[in-house]
Image (cartoon, rainbow, N blue to C red):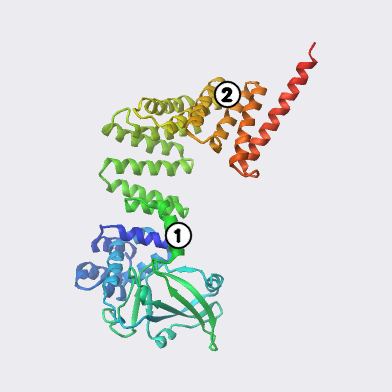
């Protein structure tokens, strides 16, 4: 699904032009006079030909774009977003040349590394997403010319079956008459990120593997479920930020940072600037670069202060995050300062958010606990518990956590009998709301056992006193 959302993000963009592509490409072909000549020609005459014509032209564009798609080099793909968008849109507007048919079969001959082929075979029956724009032909003889093999590679003929009755959101077309090669190869082109189901894989008598694929449209239920799950994770109104989230999902934080910083340079709305600074701050926080994270969140506060009042509830999230980072740095006074700022705003709101207030109490209690200031921590943990008992169902597992927090503070204050009572409440709720083998249930059970033993020891000691 990575390729699907990379494609979706690039198609959402509205900027870019041939001059940006040319400028980017010159850097990469600095020592290649022939390709530099093609780049000049592309920049000067781009609008004289169609995107399909340029894509099939044997110049820098085809090679650079497909290598970037295969390697998932997102910086290059972003630089080429204007062309990718135009090529995809043209494929969707080319008139059909098989309207009288219910189905068509297309072919692609190629060699495939044994390791790649084995992965394909293991996924038989599953989905296959092709990262690049896929060239095919309606002539099996043309395709067979490209199928060959050696010790490290298999000869493969990809056979693509398309049901024309379900042709939604068209992303492929017959380009034979508008290709640079003009009718030589009976060529069809699929857009990047096209998805297929691997129907079957079989070998013929000539040692050529036939890989049968069925083209999947946007209404395939498996594809819809996968797409919606990832869309909820990465969706963002700013395409560069969506690319940043996509990079984080694929464990590429350095690239995510680049996209966020590029987005920050481009946006002009203060709310967008704040949102991107928050993304950067969160990125640095997860990488334990706490000073850099604080810098981003404090920059967002500076923007807020120019645009909202000091008691605007929009500030509380940032105050809490800054407080948490200071707590990680064991700068407890600063941590408490920002947690209390958040709490003050929450308490003066006309329509208070009890859940947010409880979160502030928890944050403050945690700081006091980290400083071994157990009486203060106990006060705030009890405040949090009181709110949860009021706003949550009585068997909610979060209430069990609050009971356990209070119990631990009582234990630290040597009030073992009270600790047992609160910890028993925690475990009773766990047993109602969570499986007996859940990690929280087991932790709370172990704590209860420990507090009970300590209480028993104390009782024996007290009884033995004269």
Residue found at x 40% / y 62%? 4
Q: Nearer the viewer, residue 51 or 164?
A: 164
Q: Label 1: how many residues lie within 10 Å, few (<14), some (14-19) or many (20+)?
A: few
Asked if residue 100 lies left or right of residue 462, the reply is left
- Up the image or down, 25 lies above or below 288; here it is below
Residue 8, given in percent of the width and then of the height, sits at 35, 60
Residue found at x 61% / y 33%? 426
Residue 107 falls in which quadrant of the image? bottom left
Residue 394 falls in which quadrant of the image? top right
SS under mark 1: helix
Residue 465, given in percent of the width and then of the height, sits at 78, 13
Residue tagged 1: 225
Residue found at x 23% / y 62%? 19
Asked if residue 306 lies left or right of residue 394, the reply is left
Circle count: 2
Q: Are marks 2 and 1 in contact (CB under 8 Å)?
A: no
Q: Which tag is nearer the camera, tag 2 or tag 1?
A: 1
Distance of mark 2 from mark 1, alpha carbons?
Answer: 48 Å
Please indicate, yes or no, whether residue 73 appears anywhere in the rendered image: no
Residue found at x 36% / y 58%? 75
Q: Label 2: how many residues lie within 10 Å, few (<14), some (14-19) or many (20+)?
A: few
Q: Quadrant of the C terminus?
A: top right
Residue tagged 2: 372
Q: Quadrant of the N terminus?
A: bottom left
Q: Earlier in the sequence, mark 2 or mark 1?
A: 1
Residue 229, given in percent of the width and then of the height, sits at 44, 55
């Amino acid at each position: 699904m990575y390729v699907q959302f990379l494609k979706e993000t690039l198609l959402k963009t509205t900027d870019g032009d041939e001059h940006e592509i040319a400028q980017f490409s010159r850097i990469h072909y600095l020592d290649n006079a022939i390709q530099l000549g093609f780049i000049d020609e592309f920049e000067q005459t781009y609008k004289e030909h169609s995107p399909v014509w340029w894509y099939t032209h044997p110049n820098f564009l085809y090679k650079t774009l497909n290598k970037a798609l295969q390697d998932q080099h997102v910086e290059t793909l972003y630089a080429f977003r204007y062309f990718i968008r135009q090529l995809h849109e043209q494929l969707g507007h080319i008139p059909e040349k098989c309207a009288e048919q219910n189905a068509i079969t297309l072919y692609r001959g190629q060699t495939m590394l044994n390791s790649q082929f084995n992965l394909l075979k293991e996924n038989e029956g599953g989905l296959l997403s092709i990262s690049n724009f896929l060239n095919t032909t309606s002539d099996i003889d043309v395709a067979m010319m490209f199928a060959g093999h050696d010790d490290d590679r298999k000869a493969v003929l990809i056979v693509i079956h398309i049901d024309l009755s379900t042709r939604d959101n068209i992303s492929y077309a017959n380009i034979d008459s508008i290709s640079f090669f003009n009718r030589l190869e009976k060529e069809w082109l699929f857009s990047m990120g096209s998805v297929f189901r691997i129907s079957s894989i079989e070998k013929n008598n000539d040692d050529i593997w036939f890989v049968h694929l069925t083209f999947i449209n946007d209404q395939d239920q498996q594809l819809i479920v996968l797409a919606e799950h990832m869309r909820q994770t990465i969706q963002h109104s700013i395409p560069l930020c969506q690319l940043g989230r996509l990079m984080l999902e694929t464990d590429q934080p350095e690239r995510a940072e680049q996209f966020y910083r590029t987005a920050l340079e481009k946006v002009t709305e203060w709310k967008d600037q704040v949102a991107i600074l928050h993304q950067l701050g969160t990125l640095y926080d997860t990488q334990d670069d706490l000073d850099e994270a604080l810098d981003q969140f404090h920059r967002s506060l500076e923007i807020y202060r120019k645009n909202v009042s000091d008691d605007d509830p929009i500030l509380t999230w940032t105050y809490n995050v800054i407080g948490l980072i200071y707590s990680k740095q064991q700068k407890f006074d600063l941590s408490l300062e920002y947690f209390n700022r958040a709490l003050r705003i929450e308490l003066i709101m006309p329509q208070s958010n009890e859940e947010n207030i409880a979160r502030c109490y928890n944050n403050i209690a945690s700081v006091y606990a980290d400083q071994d200031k157990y009486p203060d921590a106990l006060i705030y943990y009890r405040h949090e518990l009181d709110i949860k008992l009021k706003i949550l169902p009585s068997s909610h597992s979060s209430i069990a956590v609050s009971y356990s927090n209070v119990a631990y503070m009582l234990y630290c204050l040597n009030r073992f009998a009270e600790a047992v009572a609160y910890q028993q409440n925690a475990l009773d709720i766990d047993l109602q709301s969570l499986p007996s083998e859940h990690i929280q249930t087991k932790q709370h059970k172990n704590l209860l056992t420990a507090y009970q033993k300590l209480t028993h020891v104390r009782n024996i000691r007290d009884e033995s006193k004269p």
